[in-house]
Amino acid sequence: MPKPIILAVDDEPHVLNAVTRDLQERYRGDYRIVKALSGQEALEATQEFKRRGAALALLVVDQRMPGMSGIELLGRAINLYPDAKRVLLTAYADTDAAIASINEVALDYYLMKPWDPPEEQLYPVLDDLLDAWAATVPVPYDGIRVAGTLWSPRSHAVKEFLARSQIPYQWLDIDKDDEARSLVEASTPGRNVLPLLFLPDGTVLEDPDLQVLADKVGLRSPALEPFYDLVVIGAGPAGLAAAVYGASEGLRTVVVEREVPGGQAGTSARIENYLGFPQGIGGADLARRAATQARRLGAELLVAQEVTSVRVEGQYRIVTLDDGSELRCHALLLATGVALRTLDVPGLEPLLGASVYYGAATSEAGNYRDRDVLVVGGANSAGQGAMFLSRFARSVTILVRGESLHRSMSRYLIDQIERTANIAVRPRTEITAVAGDRHLSSVTLLDHGTGAMVTEPADAIFIFVGGVARSELVADLVECDPAGFILTGQDLVAGGRRPRGWHLPRDPLLMESSVPGIFAAGDVRHDVVRRVASAVGQGSVAVSAVHRYLETV
């Protein structure tokens, strides 16, 4: 934790050096002593301290300074650091002004020049003030701070990115925190740009692109090699499993992930039926462990980098990234998963990221404490999301179009939901419209069982309605089913005939696509069990098929 700051300000260099010397002598072990030769310089330094999230404990300020007096400086600094202690250095002639400033700027003390000896005239006063400051002011957060509003989709996107990357941050809601609002206004005067990110090194990012943010927090890095045995696109459970097994078996392996590791599973608040975790495990935590394991075994992970195209040149598969660079490889594994299916409901789209969310949105759940929320969907992800939200919300209502949850949800989740007092299930029900200005206020529900339509108040909607294949990257390259899921292995051999253009004297390998050397694993494959354990198994088995393919290259 950085030391709190004592700021000394005086326009006379010899006086400033003298007060700085005395402050250093007594307080340098516990405080950082900073000096400024003018009120403007001191104000700019104070603004920089605030941007960095540094603690300012004490200002020792001369009254008579050109351009900006000590009282004027303290009056402006108090807006940034209302809890900082304030001491004015005065000459005898300034006594009346100092006394008046006790009320004007909440002055804590004024000292007459000279203050010798400091052991009698300076230190006892400052000791008391600093002890009082340390006892009442909380230690400032020294990590990333995100300032914005709860109802800002861009603020939500940044928070969700950091949360899924398991990067700690402090949320500053300018609608509720006057100090946060002052910080934003001081950092972007005259501009209304949100969210603002304040990094520990003093950098301020204005509504950053997530790839820029990834660069700044050290997530995004270039590939170390131009050529690999195996390139994996997608760092969900299937892609991470392939990275672990590929690297551990000696393959030069790199994984490219457009967002953060974890895929759809990474958004799950808790996965309770994954082997080896009797108490369950959060999706983001499982992804973090898998990514760490893959890196330890020698795989590279390129995070927040998007693949823009894939092409084949002879025996090489070539992947182009969003920065224009290329990765060449012998074998390519597509583990791109699915994109969340969207709801076509009037009024819904303007509220996305601002009280309407796809997935559990774990970074937002705490904002709906003692509120009424809806969960749309009846599969395991919806049940896991409902259980997580029930820890915060006053009520959680699961809307499912089917007769019950039993057809699509695991028994253990149904049992948990039935035992949770603040979760209700409404079968045969769907949302037909939503209403709200900056955020959700009500929903219109249709009960297909009775035909009744009602409008009810609601504070948030969390949507889990399945996914669509993320195969658009290779849609013109490999064969897919009508829904866009990639066909592999024996699904490509129809009536004993191999895929069109297949030139090898063998059938496609297990999990091999219609293009030799391009494989698929996880939810993007046709007709698979969409569970985390299944995806992990497919990722590991795909590596075995890659080895068999490489024997022929």
Image (spheres, helix red, strand yellow):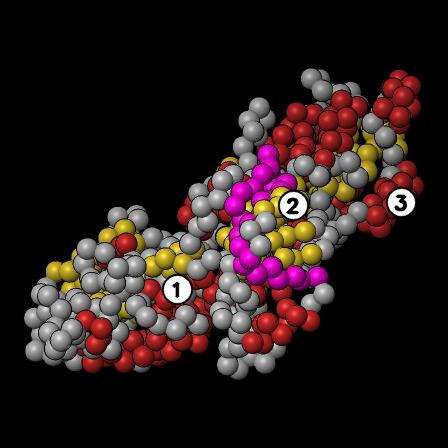
Please, what is the three-letter code of the amino acid marked with disc 1?
Ala
Q: Is residue 544 above or below residue 73?
A: below
Q: Is residue 307 above or below residue 250?
A: above
Please, what is the three-letter code of the amino acid marked with disc 3?
Asp
- Could you tell me what secondary structure mostly forms the magenta stretch? strand
| Residue 259 magenta | no
Residue at mark 3: 128
Point out residue 202 in the picture as x, y percentages from the top left corner: 57, 42
Q: Quadrant of the image for the N terminus?
A: bottom right
Callout 3: 10 Å neighbours few (<14), some, many (20+)? few
Give SS at disc 2. Answer: strand
- Residue 162 visible (yes or no): no
Q: Quadrant of the image for the C terminus?
A: bottom left
Residue at mark 1: 235
N-terminal label among 1 and 3: 3
Tell us which disc is closer to us: 3 or 2: 2
